[in-house]
Amino acid sequence: MESKILLENGTNELEVLEFKIDDHCYGINVAKIKEIITYQDVTPVPNAHPSIEGIFMPRDTMITAIDLRNCLQRGTSQPGGLFIVTNFNKLDIAFHVDSVIGIHRVSWADIIKPNATISTAEQSISTGIIKYDDRLIIILDFEKIVSDINPNTGLNMDQLKDIGERSRPDIPIVLAEDSQLLNKLIVDALSKAGYTNVKNFENGKLAYDYITDLKEKDKLDEVKCIITDVEMPIMDGHRLTKLIKTDDKTKNIPLIIFSSLVNEEMRRKGESLGADRQLSKPEIGNLVSTIDELVELE
């Protein structure tokens, strides 16, 4: 089963693949999927994390297989079922699931964000919940699942060590990132790089409303750069990019897509919407240098 991005650009829609573990329904953004294949025997890796089943090499590419059942604390998977082969944060990873139900096209506006009664932001491995027909589909945070297994796949804060002391409070930045943990980490990283004037929002709509309010007050000089994730409830980063870049008053504000979903096809999508730069989330050092470059070019 090959994955194709069928959506028009900037429509605030996504396609979710629904799959099952036991009788529970889960979802993943189709944009993360390379293919779905039947289970293959894997080679165990000594001293690996308990959720790592092992490695295998389809088409001469080594892929790590992760037991999603184990990650969800539902026991250990047995041979059989399917591998959902994904690509995000420049990593090829296969997730072992029981079965696949189908693909659903939904709006980001219809995705319910889990509240604090379910789990804290730091602990949650769910980015949203979809009500579809008579069932709830939990969209899993695959980036957090992987970073919990190997923290080195997350933001590489070590890239900021050589920047040195500097102060740039006169460069106001707008950040749209729905993960509270990543939002805080990015703000902290920018602060270490001297960018202390950051307005951060948990989705594209809140960021867009803020920018629109500044536009109406003729205060757009209070936004020198926009940084946006792609996957966000209510309004995603591609929709935000389209709205900013099709407005004559805001189109010249530098906009950076900072996402785990900067693969070849999604990069083309971002370019067509007018994004000035697109970076994968581990590249926090590149994010800082890219901001430096874009605000200097203004």
Image: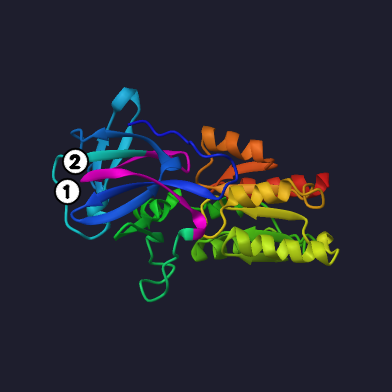
Nearer mark to the viewer, of 2 and 1:
2
Q: Which residues are magenta?
A: 86-109
Q: Is residue 82 above or below residue 213?
A: above
Residue wearing tag 1: 77
Residue drawn at the location 50% of the way across and 61% of the way down: 179
Q: Is residue 178 above or below residue 87?
A: below
What amino acid is found at the position of numbered circle 1 in the picture? Ser
Horizontal side of residue 240 vs 262, given as left or right: right
Residue wearing tag 2: 81
In this rendering, does residue 9 appear at all?
yes
For this rendering, which residue is in front, 98 or 107? 107
Which quarter of the rendering shows the N terminus?
Answer: top left
For this rendering, which residue is in front, 76 or 105? 105
Horizontal side of residue 12 vs 221, given as left or right: left
Q: Is residue 88 magenta?
A: yes
Task: Tell me whether the residue at label 2 lies in contact with that at label 1, contact meaning CB atoms closer than 8 angstroms.
Answer: yes
Quick one: which residue is furthest to the left in this view?
78
